[in-house]
Image: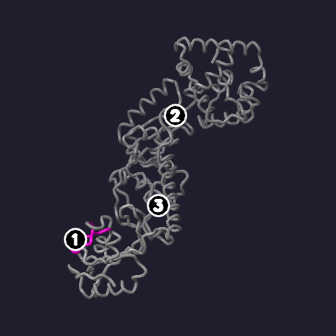
C-alpha cells in the first residue's frame, strides 16, 4: 500500500486522491513518488522515496519547501510553468535517478501542485540513449568551438612583414587606430594585405575577445545581401526558417565586422548600412522589431572610392561615416626592400619536397624579383614562389628557376637568363658579399644568431642554412 499522509497547502483533496490512485496502479513501475502543493511545499511522499533519500523514520518533511529535501528538484519549475518534465536525470548525492514530473491542474486548468516519481535508480537502462546524447553534445561542442575559432582573428600585426620605413609607419598607425573604436577604411590595391591588417586592428583593440566576422561584398549576390547583413525573421517568406536566422551584424555583436571590397556594395544596401552606423540598430528581414548591436566597422576597397563618390556610385554620407580612420596600404612595388624578407616568410609556409631541409632563395633571384612591378602584390608574389618551389630541382631557388616560374620576367633579363645564374664571376662576387654580410651581422649581434638573423631580415632557419653553406659553423 501507498503511505498516505494528510496533504496540506492548496492542493485540492480530490486531485490528491486521483493522483495517489494512479500511483497505486503504477506502483510496480516506479521506485518512489513525491507530491507538492501550489507553493512547492511537500504535501505527500511515499515510503520508498523516503528510503531512497535516506530520511530518518521520525523526520516529517510534510509542509517543507521541496528544495530542503531535494536540492536539485525541478518540481517548483513545473508548478510555476505548468509544463511537465517527462524524462530527466536528477542527481542525489552520488546517485543518478531517472525521474518524471507532472503538474496537477484543476478543472479550470489552474496549477494546484505537482507530482514527481522515480522510474528507477539505475541509469544503465538509459545507457544507449545517454551515449547518443553524449555523442551529440560532443559534436555540438566541436561545432561551436570551430565556429568560435572561425570568428576569431587569424593574423596579428607581426604577420605583416616588412623592414621599410613605410611599413614601420604603417604599423605605428595601425596600433594607434586600434586603440580607437571608430570605423576604419583600408585603401590599397588587391593583394596588399588589407584583410590581414583588419585582423590586426581587431586583435590589438579592446574588442579582441569579441568575434571577428568578415564579409566579401563582391562574393554575395545582391538579392541576398539584406538577409546576410540583418538576418531573417521566422516565416519572413516562403521557405524561411521557423526560427530567427541571425545576420552578420548580430554575429559580430561585441566585436568587429569587416566589409571587404565595400566599393561593390549596392546603393540600396548602403542606405541601410548608414542607418545602422547612425542608430546602432538593425531590423531583420520580415520583422518590425529593432535590435541594438554594438559593432565596429572596418571596411576595405581596392577601388578609387573618392572617384566613386564624385560619380555618385557610392554614397558620400556613408563614405564620410566609414572613413573616420583612413589607412593607405602601400603597394609592393613601393617598398621593394621588403621583398626579400617577405619571400623568406612566405617560403617558410611552403612545404619542401621530399626530405629537403628548406628553401634557399639566392640573392640574384631576390634582385630579379625586385625589378618586377607586381600588380598582384604579395598575393602574386606567393603564387610565383609556389610555382618556383614546384619546378625547382633542389632546395635552391635561383634566378633561372624564378624566370621559369614567371615568364613575364624573361623580357626583363632577355631570352637567355642562364648566364645570370651560371656566371662564375658573378656567383663568386655574390657569395663573398653574402659571407661578409653574415659575418658582419654576427659581429653586430655579439654572436647571437637569432639577433643576427633579424638584422639581416631573414628567418633563423634560413640564417642557419646560409651559415652552413658558407662553412661558418652552426
Judged from the image, the secondary structure of the residue bearing numbered disc 1 is loop
Please report whichever mark, 3 or 2, sits nearer to the chain's N-terminal start: 2
Q: Nearer the viewer, mark 3 or mark 2?
A: 2
Q: Quadrant of residue 88?
A: bottom left
Name the spot of residue 78 as percent of width and height, x first: 32, 73
Q: 10 Å neighbourhood of mark 3: few (<14), some, or many (≥20)?
A: some
- Quadrant position of residue 249: bottom left
* Image height of 253 relative to 73, above or below: above
Where does the magenta region start and end? 54-67
Residue that mark 1 sits on: 64
Q: Badge 2: how crowded within 10 Å, few (<14), some, or many (20+)?
A: some
Q: Main secondary structure of the magenta part?
A: loop
Nearer the observer, 243 or 118: 118
Residue 401, image x, y percentages: 74, 29
Q: CA distance from mark 1 to mark 2?
A: 64 Å
Distance in Å between CA atoms under marks 3 and 2:
33 Å
Asked whether 448 or 314 is in front, the reply is 448
CB atoms of marks 3 and 1 within 8 Å: no
Res. 227 mark: 3
Q: Residue at x 73, y 16 (%)?
A: 427
Q: Indicate whether residue 63 is drawn in magenta.
A: yes
189 lies left or right of 109 = right
Q: Residue at x 42, y 29 (%)?
A: 172
Residue nearest the viewer, comparing 194 with 100? 100
User: Is residue 62 within the magenta segment?
Assistant: yes
Amino acid at each position: 500500500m501507498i503511505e498516505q499522509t494528510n496533504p496540506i497547502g492548496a492542493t485540492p483533496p480530490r486531485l490528491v486522491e486521483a493522483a495517489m490512485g494512479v500511483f497505486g496502479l503504477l506502483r510496480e513501475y516506479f521506485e518512489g513518488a513525491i507530491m507538492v502543493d501550489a507553493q512547492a511545499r511537500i504535501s505527500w511522499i511515499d515510503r520508498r522515496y523516503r528510503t531512497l533519500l535516506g530520511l530518518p523514520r521520525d523526520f516529517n518533511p510534510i509542509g517543507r519547501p521541496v528544495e530542503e529535501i531535494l536540492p536539485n528538484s525541478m518540481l517548483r519549475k513545473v508548478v510555476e510553468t505548468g509544463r511537465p518534465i517527462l524524462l530527466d536525470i536528477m542527481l542525489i548525492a552520488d546517485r543518478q535517478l531517472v525521474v518524471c514530473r507532472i503538474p496537477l491542474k484543476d478543472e479550470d486548468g489552474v496549477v494546484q501542485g505537482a507530482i514527481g516519481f522515480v522510474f528507477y535508480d539505475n541509469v544503465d537502462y538509459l545507457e544507449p540513449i545517454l551515449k547518443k546524447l553524449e555523442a551529440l553534445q560532443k559534436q555540438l561542442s566541436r561545432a561551436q568551438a570551430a565556429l568560435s575559432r572561425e570568428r576569431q582573428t587569424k593574423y596579428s600585426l607581426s604577420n605583416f612583414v616588412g623592414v621599410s620605413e613605410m611599413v614601420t609607419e604603417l604599423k605605428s598607425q595601425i596600433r594607434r587606430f586600434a586603440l580607437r573604436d571608430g570605423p576604419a577604411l583600408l585603401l590599397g590595391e588587391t593583394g596588399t594585405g588589407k584583410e590581414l591588417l583588419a585582423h590586426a586592428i581587431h586583435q590589438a583593440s579592446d574588442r579582441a575577445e569579441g568575434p571577428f566576422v568578415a564579409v566579401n561584398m563582391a562574393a554575395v549576390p545582391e538579392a541576398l545581401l539584406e538577409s546576410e547583413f540583418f538576418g531573417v525573421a521566422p516565416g519572413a517568406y516562403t521557405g524561411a526558417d521557423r526560427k530567427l536566422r541571425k545576420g552578420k551584424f548580430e554575429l559580430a555583436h561585441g566585436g568587429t565586422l569587416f566589409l571587404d571590397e565595400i566599393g561593390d556594395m549596392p546603393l540600396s544596401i548602403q542606405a541601410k548600412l548608414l542607418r545602422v552606423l547612425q542608430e546602432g540598430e538593425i531590423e531583420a528581414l520580415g520583422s518590425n522589431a529593432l535590435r541594438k548591436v554594438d559593432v565596429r566597422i572596418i571596411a576595405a576597397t581596392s577601388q578609387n572610392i573618392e572617384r566613386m563618390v564624385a560619380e555618385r556610385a557610392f554614397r558620400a554620407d556613408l563614405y564620410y561615416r566609414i572613413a573616420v580612420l583612413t589607412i593607405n596600404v602601400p603597394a609592393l612595388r613601393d617598398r621593394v626592400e621588403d621583398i626579400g624578407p617577405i619571400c623568406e616568410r612566405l617560403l617558410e609556409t611552403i612545404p619542401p619536397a621530399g626530405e629537403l631541409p628548406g628553401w634557399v632563395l639566392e640573392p640574384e633571384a631576390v634582385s630579379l624579383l625586385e625589378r618586377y612591378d607586381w600588380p598582384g602584390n604579395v598575393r602574386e608574389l606567393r603564387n610565383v614562389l609556389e610555382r618556383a618551389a614546384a619546378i625547382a630541382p633542389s632546395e635552391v631557388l635561383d634566378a633561372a628557376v624564378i624566370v621559369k616560374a614567371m615568364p613575364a620576367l624573361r623580357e626583363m633579363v632577355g631570352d637567355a637568363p642562364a648566364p645570370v645564374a651560371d656566371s662564375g664571376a658573378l656567383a663568386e662576387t655574390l657569395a663573398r658579399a653574402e659571407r661578409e654580410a653574415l659575418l658582419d651581422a654576427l659581429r653586430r649581434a655579439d654572436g647571437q644568431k637569432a639577433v643576427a638573423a633579424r638584422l639581416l631580415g631573414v628567418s633563423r632557419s634560413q640564417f642557419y642554412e646560409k651559415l652552413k653553406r658558407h662553412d661558418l659553423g652552426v
